Amino acid sequence: MATQKVGGEVDAQCTRCKLTLAHTILAMVGPKIARVRCNTCGGDHVYRAAPGVTDRPSASSSGTARAARAATAAAAKAEKVIISFEEQLSGKDVANAPKYSPKDTYQVDQVIQHPTFGTGFVTAVRGDKVDITFRTDTKTLVHGRGGAPAEKPAFSPPNARSTGPADKPQPAQGSELPAEPVAEGEPPVSTEG
Ligand SMILES: [Zn+2]
């Protein structure tokens, strides 16, 4: 900004001419122009900045701060989504991520490289399907289609858990003891009477 001083010229809005014209600075308050004289009509008046020149520190600064805050918030919001995926990947074994193949068998949290979707990690395993979260989307892919014999015994089949101890002859010592005295409960023999 050019140094403004009393006697110098400045473009300002003339209140009489209703135009942005060259004015001579008559008075200044600190760094700010207070009064000017229109070089065209010769009238003295309070300095009004030319349109397009923002010379209102209170309004412009708060507006700028508001805009900056909004931009920062938007940036933080957008950044958060990206970081969350990266952070989830960062805790996993990305370096040894194998290329996706429907013949391989995957497990939850395993990282894989997909030729189309890029890097992703397994979020769910459902039988012969796996849900894999990629940067842009979550895809359901097949796995375990190669009949890999080495992998199968390593996994305990999930239906073994559902049968539970019900059909197993568990030695339940405590439960049988009270049953016998109740069965022996015969009506008392009354010989008297
Ligand atoms: Zn004027």
Image (cartoon, rainbow, N blue to C red):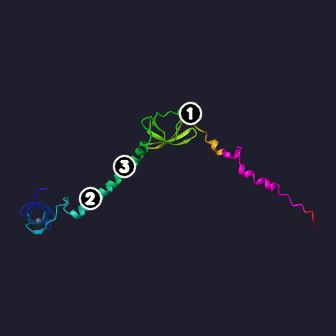
How packed mark 3 is, by other alpha carbons closer than 10 Å (few <14, some 14-19, many 20 or more), is: few
| Res 1 label | none
- Circle 1 Cα neighbour tier, 10 Å, few/some/many (<14 / 14–19 / ≥20): few
Residue at horizontal 66 percent and vertical 45 percent from the top: 164
Which residue position is annotated with label 3? Answer: 79
- Describe residue 122's horizontal placement relative to residue 161 as left or right: left
Give yes or no for residue 34 being in the magenta stretch.
no
**Is label 3 or label 1 in front?**
1
Residue 148 located left or right of residue 15: right
Residue 20, image quadrant: bottom left
x 59%, y 34%: residue? 153
Mark 2 crowdedness (10 Å alpha carbons): few <14, some 14-19, many ≥20: few
Residue under numbered circle 2? 64
Which numbered disc, 2 or 3, marks the residue that appears first in the sequence? 2
| Amino acid at dot 1 | Glu
The kind of residue on which mark 3 rests is Glu
Number of the front mark, 1 or 2: 1
Residue lying furthest front in this view?
Answer: 192
Marks 1 and 2 in Cβ contact (< 8 Å):
no
The quadrant in which the N terminus is found is bottom left
Q: Is residue 40 visible?
A: no
Q: Which residue is mark 1?
A: 151
Q: Tell me which residue sits at (26%, 62%) in the image.
A: 62
Q: Which residues are magenta?
A: 163-189
Against 188, residue 121 (above or below) is: above
- The amino acid marked with disc number 2 is Thr
Determine whether the residue tagged by mark 1 lies in a helix, strand or loop: loop
Residue 158 image offset from top left, x and y in percent? 61, 42
Indicate which disc, 3 or 1, sits on the residue closer to the N terminus: 3
Q: CA distance from mark 3 to mark 1?
A: 39 Å
Residue 6 placement (x, y as % from top left) = 7, 64
Location of residue 17 by image quarter: bottom left
